[in-house]
Image (tube, rainbow, N blue to C red):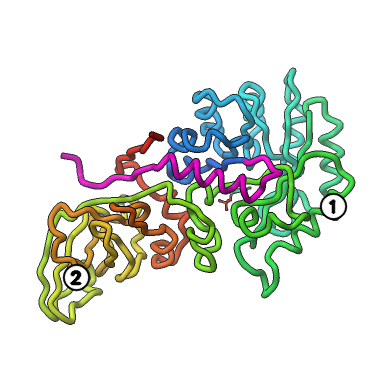
Amino acid sequence: MPRPIEALIHVSALAHNLARARACAPDAQVWAVVKANAYGHGIEAAFEGLRAADGFACLDLDEARRLRELDWRGPILLLEGCFEARDLELCSRLKLWHAVHCEQQIDWLAMHKTHEPHRVFLKMNSGMNRLGFTPQAFRAAWTRLNALPQVDEISLMTHFSDADAQRFGKDGIAHQVAAFQAATADLPGERSLSNSAATLRYNQLTEVRADWVRAGIMSYGGVPDYPEHDANHWDLRPAMTLRAKVIGIQQLQPGDSVGYGSSFVAEAPMRIGTVACGYADGYPRHASSGTPVLVEGQRSRTVGRVSMDMLAVDLTELPHAGLGSEVTLWGQGPKGSLLPIDEVARAAGTIGYELMCAITRRVPVTVQHLE
Ligand SMILES: *Cc1c(COP(=O)(O)O)cnc(C)c1O
């Protein structure tokens, strides 16, 4: 028997969440962002749930190739563009749209031999200071691109650093929206500004509305602005469940400790279960003792430190639980129970994004297809 742990991918939840992105941005086209192997869900499974998207946005050329192998003929956008000149050959061959964020990428395009001009997304650094042309340099980059026979349509793109919260006590996106608007006001082309957080929080504002939104985390049911809002508030459903089973039971007396470093010490008699899930599966080692779990759909908590292959959960109040009991580490539990990944992430000092992406290869993945 294989080790009792698995990740479930819920195709119907992906489809539901994509519909939520559409509802938030009814006039926009939706990029389903499938970078990082679809945030850990697997490109193929994600494609099944998100195929109603208008396009797929990714980073790796290999992910783009896999989408074409799935027979996706629609738009694919490389969010970081090309990493070297010869990547453009694959862009031509697979008809990939690509970001252009620096002069070197324009140099490569200018030297590229192609019969079919490329659709590009010119990226502005409107304040995040990661990738893109500054507002001052943007127009010159646009003019240069526009003169190239290798370039077809030029779309305009920027990315928010603080769409999920306030920035310095104020609205997190206003300064970037203003910079983008001012520098692009009289340029033609489609626009794309919003990630999930901006799509959920700001799409009612006209100045934020654009031709394309880029729905990443929300497609997978993760909440970008947790704990200010939760999945219920935004009507998002978890697309990934991580579950395992109890493989050992221990009875503790007051003063007994649990796990490495004896960081947890029982104050009263306790019954704990050892679960076949550890940090080598992608469960966060930094999840503090007391991180929520579901045991047979009922809430409990972890006890002590997470080890490589195991962690402990409190069964004291769950007398019916025992060897073989199902433990939901996050996602959808039995009988309609739910444990939001955002809650687990918070207890581990991180965000749902990191946990989804961190599921390791040794965890078998089961895709729950549509009925
Ligand atoms: C990852 C990414 C997104 C999606 O962000 P979410 O917060 O997951 O919605 C959008 N745009 C760009 C440029 C990205 O890199």
- Per the rendered image, the range of residues in magenta is 1-30
Describe residue 170's horizontal placement relative to residue 154 as left or right: left
Residue at label 2?
317
For residue 12, above or below residue 352: above
User: In the rendered picture of this protein, how many numbered marks are placed on residues?
Assistant: 2
Corner quadrant of residue 247: bottom left
Element on which disc 1 rests: helix
For residue 9, above or below residue 327: above
Q: Residue visible at 43% across and 36% down?
A: 45
The crowding category of the residue bearing disc 1, from other C-alpha atoms within 10 Å (few below 14, some 14 to 19, many at least 20), is some
Q: Position of residue 108 (x, y in %)?
A: 72, 32
Q: Residue furthest right?
A: 186
Task: Pick whichever of labels 2 and 1 is earlier in the sequence.
Answer: 1
Numbered label attached to residue 277: none
Residue at label 1?
183
Residue situated in front as seen by the camera: 150 or 12:
12
Residue situated in front as seen by the camera: 326 or 246:
326
Q: Is residue 8 magenta?
A: yes
**In the picture, which quadrant includes the N terminus?**
top left
Q: Residue visible at 43% across and 47% down?
A: 239
Q: Residue visible at 35% across and 65% down?
A: 287
Corner quadrant of residue 144: top right
Q: Position of residue 299 (x, y in %)?
A: 29, 65
Q: Amino acid at mark 1?
A: Ala
Residue mark closest to the camera, 2 vs 1:
2
Assess whether mark 1 and mark 2 are in contact (beta carbons under 8 angstroms).
no
Corner quadrant of residue 56: top right
Q: Amino acid at mark 2?
A: Glu
For residue 116, above or below residue 283: above
Residue situated in front as seen by the camera: 217 or 202:
202
